[in-house]
Every structure is written in structure tokens, then in C-alpha cells.
Image: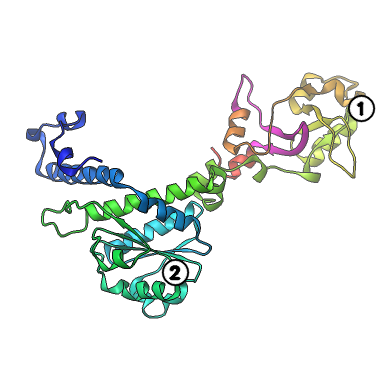
């Protein structure tokens, strides 16, 4: 473990040496001092992680209810963020304000919950009722604090004690370094839980359906047409009926499958007929010819689990862009997707 003293006496990193004090304005000099102080504190926090961190992750992973995160003042703002991060990464979590807890919101904390309480001093008076409540009902309490001798650390089942770095504020009063450490430690807990549970990008999309992130993780199966909407005919279907199927389904495309059954899934996809195929095979006897004579074999297809953004890439790929794709599962069509479906879903 590297001590704060050894960190400060180490030779400057390349980034440090590249900055000459003479080139810094007072504002930039102040900002640099804050950022370097917090960087060093984060390094010591990483080096100081030990058995209490493992115990905290184990307690949170074993939680059968919610993780209730609480804190007062600036610690409360950090606690809200930690609760939100945990909730979005698969851990049921909520924030409870300690002052409101004393006036009825203790009822939000269940017997199967775990409480994660944040207090820089470890002696925040407003936390006393929550601490007492967890002790009375045997609710696991994890404390995140800078004081190992404070009330929170002494009462908690697990104490995550921050390294003793001063605040970056020149007065040593405004919560700066301490809140940065709490925020980072909360992120570390959330990610450790995420990895312990095997939380995937697919799971993440469930909790983030809106915005660009949700769109980026959208799957083909979530936007594809399926069932009766699929335009399908068999190889020997005359083009007169094939054209009717194309027009009826309205996609400008029809899939040619080995077999069709009203009681089961269609057979394997053999090819497709598109508007382009019709133009290339225009003749007086077109409507009498079977679909297999007109179809394009081995068309581009995608699986249902593919990301919608990847399906769009497939449509735009190769030398000739296309506007639609059949979705296959073990060679059989289970869906159909048009570029307009992807655009409407916000995939780009």
C-alpha cells in the first residue's frame, strides 16, 4: 500500500511535468491543485480497499429487499447518486432522507433491506434515528465515513473508512475531496455488484429504454414484424399470387420458404423476391412463372438477438444497400424488419 507521503514525494508524471506554473492563470492553478489533490486521494482509496469492502459487497449482494442509501447535506447528494447508479445496474435501491426518516419515512426501510449510510464525520445527528432503527430490527448497516471512531463506524456492521486526506478547499471546510471519495467508492460498490451478478448490456437496456443509450442497445426482436405480418410464399407459388402477397403485406418484398403450415412455423428461407427482382425479370410471362425462378438466393438476414444498430449496418453494408431484412432463427423466418422500423425506433 502506498502512503500519502510516498505519493507526494514521487517524481511528477508526464502530465505534471508538461505544465509550467508560469503558464497557469490563478483560476487554472486553483483548479489544478484541487484535481491533483483529489487524484492522490483516489489513489490512496484504491490502495486501501480491504476486507471491509468485500464484506460490504457480500452484504449488498445478499440483500433480499432494497439497498437504502442515506446521508445528510453534501453526503446526501452523493447518496442519491449512489442509489440511482445501483438502481440502474440491477440492484434495487432507494434514497431515504435522514431528516424525513425521523418523521415517518423509516417505514420505507424494510426488514430485508440493507442500509448504506454516508457521513464524513461519522457523527451526523440526523442519522441517529436510522442507525437506531437498523440496530433495533437487525437490518444490516454499512457505514461510509472518514472517522473510524465516529458513531456511524462504531455502530455499523461494516465500516468503509475513507483515507484521511484533507479537503481540497483551501479553508479545509467545503466537502470536496471527501465527497469525491464517497462518489467513487459508491461507483466501485455498484460495479462490483454488477459484475458479481453477471449484469449484461441487455439487462442495462431494460433499465434505460429512453435516450440514445436505450436505442443503441435495442434488439432486432423488439422492433421486427412477426406472425401473420410476414410476407411468405412457397417456391412453386405463381408470381401472380406472389405479387398479391407482396402488395397485401406492403413491404415490397416476399420471402420464399420451403414450406408453409397453418399449424406450425414456416420452413427454411430459400430466397426473397423484391421490387428489384421484378424489374430485372420483367417479361410477358412473369405472372405465370413460379417464385423460385425469380427469387434471389442467399439474401442477407439477421438473427433476432442482433442489436438493431447492427441490423442497420447490415442494410447499409456491401456494395448494394437494402431496405429490409428477414430475421432467421435456425434458418427459419421468425420476423421481418424494414429500415423505416429502425428509423422510427430512433436507431441511427
Q: Is residue 320 magenta?
A: yes
Q: Quadrant of residue 13?
A: top left
User: Which residue is pictured at 38% across the width and 75% down the height?
Assistant: 101
Extreme residue in the left direction: 22
Residue 185 pos. (x, y %): 34, 51
Task: Report the magenta residues as a range.
Answer: 316-339
- SS category of the residue bearing label 2: loop
Above or below: residue 196 compared with residue 293: below
Above or below: residue 108 compared with residue 270: below
Q: Residues within 10 Å of mark 2 (few under 14, many from 20)?
A: some
Q: Is residue 130 magenta?
A: no
Residue 120 pos. (x, y %): 25, 61
Q: Is residue 226 left or right of residue 202?
A: right
> Which residue is tagged 1?
236
Residue situated in front as seen by the camera: 193 or 308: 193
Q: Is residue 163 left or right of residue 159?
A: left
Amino acid at each position: 500500500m502506498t502512503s500519502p507521503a510516498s505519493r507526494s514525494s514521487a517524481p511528477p508524471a508526464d502530465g505534471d511535468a508538461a505544465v509550467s506554473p508560469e503558464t497557469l492563470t490563478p483560476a487554472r492553478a486553483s483548479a489544478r491543485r484541487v484535481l491533483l489533490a483529489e487524484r492522490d486521494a483516489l489513489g490512496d482509496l484504491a490502495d486501501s480497499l480491504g476486507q471491509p469492502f468485500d464484506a460490504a459487497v457480500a452484504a449488498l449482494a445478499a440483500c433480499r429487499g432494497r439497498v437504502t442509501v442515506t446521508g445528510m447535506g453534501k453526503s446526501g447528494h452523493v447518496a442519491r447518486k449512489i442509489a440511482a447508479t445501483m438502481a440502474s445496474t440491477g440492484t434495487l435501491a432507494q434514497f431515504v432522507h435522514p431528516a424525513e426518516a425521523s418523521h415517518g419515512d423509516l417505514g420505507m426501510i424494510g426488514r430485508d433491506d440493507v442500509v448504506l449510510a454516508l457521513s464524513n464525520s461519522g457523527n451526523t445527528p440526523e442519522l441517529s434515528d436510522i442507525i437506531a432503527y437498523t440496530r433495533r430490527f437487525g437490518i444490516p448497516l454499512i457505514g461510509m465515513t472518514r472517522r473510524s471512531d465516529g458513531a456511524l463506524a462504531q455502530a455499523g456492521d461494516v465500516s468503509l473508512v475513507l483515507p484521511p486526506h484533507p479537503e481540497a478547499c483551501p479553508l479545509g471546510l467545503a466537502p470536496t475531496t471527501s465527497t469525491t471519495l464517497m462518489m467513487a467508492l459508491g461507483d466501485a460498490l455498484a460495479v462490483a455488484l454488477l459484475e458479481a451478478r453477471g449484469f449484461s448490456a441487455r439487462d442495462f437496456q431494460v433499465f434505460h429504454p429512453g435516450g440514445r443509450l436505450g436505442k443503441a442497445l435495442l434488439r432486432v426482436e423488439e422492433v421486427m414484424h412477426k406472425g401473420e405480418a410476414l410476407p411468405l410464399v412457397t417456391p412453386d407459388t405463381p408470381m401472380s399470387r406472389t405479387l398479391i402477397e407482396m402488395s397485401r403485406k406492403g413491404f415490397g418484398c416476399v420471402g420464399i420458404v420451403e414450406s408453409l403450415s397453418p399449424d406450425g412455423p414456416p420452413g427454411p428461407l430459400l430466397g426473397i423476391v423484391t421490387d428489384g427482382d421484378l424489374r430485372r425479370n420483367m417479361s410477358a410471362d412473369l405472372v405465370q412463372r413460379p417464385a423460385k425462378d425469380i427469387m434471389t438466393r442467399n439474401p442477407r438476414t439477421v438473427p433476432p438477438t442482433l442489436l438493431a444498430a447492427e441490423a442497420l449496418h447490415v442494410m447499409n453494408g456491401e456494395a448494394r444497400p437494402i431496405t429490409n431484412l428477414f430475421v432467421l432463427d435456425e434458418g427459419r423466418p421468425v420476423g421481418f424488419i424494414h429500415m423505416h422500423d429502425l428509423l422510427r425506433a430512433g436507431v441511427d
